[in-house]
Every structure is written in C-alpha cells, then in structure tokens.
Image: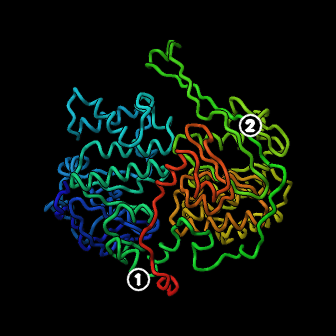
Amino acid sequence: MSIKAKKLLSVSKLAIDFETKKGTVRAVENVSFDLQKGEVLALVGESGSGKSVTAYSILNLLDANGSMPLGEIIYDGMPIHKATPAKLKEIRGREISMIFQNPMSTLNPIRKVGQHLRDMIRNHGYASWSNIEKEIDKLLKQVEIHDLDRVKNAYPFELSGGMCQRVMIALALACRSRLLIADEPTTGLDVTTQKSIMDLIKNLAKEEGLAVILITHDLGIASEYCDKFVVMEKGKVVESNSRVDFFSKSKHPYTKKLLLATPSKEGKVEDLTLEKPSYLNISEPEISEKPLLVVEGLRKTFIKKTGSFLSFVKGKEKKEEFVAVKESSFSIYSGECVGLVGGSGSGKSTTSRMLARLDDASAGKIIFDGVVISDISSNDFIKHPYRKDIQMVFQDPTGSLNPRHTVFDLIAEPLKRLGESFNKNSLDQKVESLMLQVGLPTEFMTRLPHQLSGGQKARVGIARAIALNPKFLILDEPTSALDVSVQATVLQLLEKLRRELGLSYLFVSHDLHVVKMLSQRILVMKEGIIVEQGETSKVMHSPEHSYTKQLMSSIPIIKEKLAIEAIAAF
C-alpha cells in the first residue's frame, strides 16, 4: 500500500561558496525545492550547473573550502545545516544515504566487496549478526548480481565499472534509509540492469515512502521514474515542473536545449541540435566488398588466484578459471560503424582490448586487412606497422590523458612515436590541423587536461586517435560520462569524421538509442557470446534472441512529447 506523501526535505534559498586563489566563487545561488515521502525528484543540468554541490550540501559533504553562507536545509523538521558532526555521522547512512557517481574512487581498493557490505550493515543497518550474510546476498541479488561468491570475494579493481556501480547501489540500499541521494546511479549500466535497479528504487519509494533525489542527465530515465523536475544552469534553478509539464510545457531555452539533445527511439544524430551539421553535405562512404576486420572464434580466459594471505606466501593459492569471451565471430567492413551492446561484464571491453591488441586472445583469430594480427603478441604489436591503423578512444577521457601534458603534447605524442618524421613547424601545423578537425580552438594548445571540460577532453582523445590516419577506430563508451548536449556534438563529430575519412568504427555502448543513431549494424553480447547480429533497423525493431528482446523492452522512452512549435520557437 502506498504511503501518504509527507514533506521530508525542504531546501530554501540555498547558496554555496568556494574559496579559491582568485577569491570567493558562488557555485550555487538561491536554490529552493521540497521533497515529500515517496517522491522521486530529478535534479537535471549539465556539468558545472551545481547539481552535485547542491546534493552534497544536504549531508555537509562539501570540500574544506566550501561553505553555506545563505539558506537553510530542513530534514524532517530538523535544520540539518546546523547539525553537529556527531549528529551528521548518525544521519549519514541510517537516515540519508548516497550513491556516488564514481564507484572506483569511492570503494576502498584493498577491501573486498563482502567486507564493504558487512561494514555498512554493522555500522548503520538493521541485520543481526546471525543473518548478515543472507542480507548481503539479498542486496546483491536486488542489484542484479547473481555470481555471489565471486563478487563478494572480489576487490573493486577486479570488477567492471558497471559491477562496481551495482555494489555502490547495494551499499546505499543496505541501511534502509528514508532519503536516497543518487548521483548518476545508472551511468555505465546496461538498460536491463538500469531498469531493474530503477524499478527497485521506485518500488521502495511507492511502498516504503523512500524519498529520492535523482541527479541525472538521462531524461529518458527521469521521464519514467521521476515525479517532478528541477533544472539547474550555472548554479541557479531555471525551471521547476511536474513530469508532465516538464515535457510538454517547458519554457526556458536551456531546458529545451536539453530535451532536443536527448537521443530518442526514432531520432537521428543530426536531430540532436538546432543547427544542422555540415556533414550532411558529405555522402556516405562506400562499404567495401571485403571485410576490413574478421574475428573468428575469439576467446579470452582469465586465471584468478584466491586464498588467504598465508596461502599466497606458501604458493598454495587456488586458481580459478574465468571465461570472459567465448568463441565470438563477426566482421567489420571499411566505412561502416558497427555497434557492440550488452550488459556490464558481458565481455564488450575485453573484446575491444583484444581487437586493439592491448590484450592477447586465449584462442581464435583476429584478421585485419588480410593479416592474422592475433598471432602477434600485444607487446610486439606496439612496434608493428598495423599499430597506427587500429586506434582506440577510451571511456574515461580524464583517466586516459596524462595530467601533466598540454593539449599539444597529448595530440603530438602518437605522431612522435609512430608517425613520420616531423620538424617543429610541420608538427605544429599537423596538431593545429587535427584540433580544427575535431572542433578544438587552437588557443587550447597550452592547456592542461584539468583546464578542459568533459567534451573538450573527449575531443582531445579523438584527435589523438585519428592523428595517424587509422583505418579502424574502437570507441569504448566514448560519450557515457558526457552531458546530453555535449554528447550530441561529440556524436555529430564522430559521424562527420567517418564520412570525411572513410573510417570504420566499433562503437561499444550500453545506450541503445546512441548505438542506433551511429551504427549500420549491431552485435549483441551476453556472457561473452555474440547472441545476435544484423542490420540496425532489423535488430532494433524485430529482435530474434530473447536477450535482445529484453534489451529493447528495457530502453527508457520519453512518453510525453515536447510540442514541435516550442522547439521551433527556441
């Protein structure tokens, strides 16, 4: 039975300041909203809009240089912004829990998953000593983790990003709190896991009165699960609406921009922005008759050592075999984009690393341009002539860029290592040309990665990848961490480069709307096996395998449509 709504949280005229070397910066100003029991509120906006800062201030998790000069935060009648450290410690976890955006930086790398959950339940939860293991198993199953023994005994670095995200969600749910703050909780998760977790959160809101603040840039998810929307831009609330009014009566230009940039079931890449991209004047590249890449029976097996510290010292540790990729076969032709979709832990990233020759296959063949490159070890492939023809754009642009190198150095590095000989002038001209090609201002040459936005870092990663005029690009979730409007420009850039340069792509993603927009064909992967492959329209509209059908039925769809006149008037 649904619990009657009652105001639980009230944020009023909130302002947040940060002290910097250049003086005081106001990150959030005059932010107000209310949240009732059983209500799910979407806090929407791009990076830097103040969403996370607003949410973190509720639990006083601001950095040391942050302060709250104005406003108040009332939780269940208590002015939480005035709470003592001891009171906050009691509230955190038990009353208000949080799912952080980056699980890898939140989970302790030297503690196993089971230890994380035991610590959380013992400190804040309600399980007794006798049934704590049953409670842990229940939590892991709720977030779609079924390989319980392996995951409980794994360290965070031994799991995929998506699996770590599920563990973070399990930790947040372990305390049965009354308010859940979820900061991009489904980023990096496949649509089926995403749906089951959001269904779980929504049911907890409905049946047990859990109040939820969902920080997200995925308006598709928000449209299905959120009751009301608060839109932030540059630290201020620019629009606050119910779900129906948000999608049908939004007035602010910024809100309309976000809605327009959200991928939809029938939309095209060129529809994501008001200005039509220049690549529409470039014809589609001709698809070659012979495949550029052929994969035959590809397999990857990992050996995992388990046991106590003493058993490792004595050399008596147990060895377990884990098959990540099982006999996968497919082809990619010159000039086409092939999408690779599947759940976290399905083997997508492992397959990508083998194709890029960063990892060696355990069995099978990788034939590139008629040459069996899987016979060449990953160490020897670094100096092989084909190295420059196969390049990769990584999922995390921040983690893949050297923080001490300037944009010029980052783009010039592959040219110096694998390219032709350049003198200073010719190298400068080449880097400048590449920057213009990916839409980066040349004055950014001297900037360091931390001085760039997420979209600009992604462009640097793409410029590095195309610097050597490759034939084949592997795109591993290149837009998963980007805001929708930034994602739109990056997707249009990738489509432009494919047409201009005749590149072939393997586009790895969990976002089926994005895959559909870019890809001519789709591969569907489950538990290390390609279970279905075919033309995009056929796979999307007439799937044959039960898992593919499950994926398609799990895609979040915005049911309320923004009036065409409103977008046209924007």
**Left or right: where does residue 167 sit relative to residue 275?**
left
Going by the numbered disc 1, the residue's amino acid type is Lys
Structure colour scheme: rainbow
What residue would you read off at disc 2?
296
Q: Position of residue 44 (x, y in %)?
A: 40, 67
Q: Residue furthest left?
A: 77
Residue found farthest to the bottom: 569
Instruction: Look at 33% across and 42% down and name the residue there.
Output: 171
The image quarter in which residue 25 lies: bottom left
Left or right of 192? Residue 38 is: left
Q: Residue at x 29, y 54 (%)?
A: 180
Mark 1 vs mark 2, foreground winner is 2
Q: Residues within 10 Å of mark 2 (few under 14, many from 20)?
A: some
Q: Position of residue 291 (x, y in %)?
A: 80, 49
Dot 1, how many residues are within 10 Å of its Cα: few (below 14), some (14-19), or many (20+)? some
Question: In this rendering, would 366 be left or right of 171?
Answer: right
In the picture, residue 170 is in which quadrant? top left
Is residue 566 placed above or below 426 in the rendered structure?
A: below
Question: Disc 2 marks which amino acid?
Answer: Glu
Which residue is depicted at the point 56% across and 65% down? 487
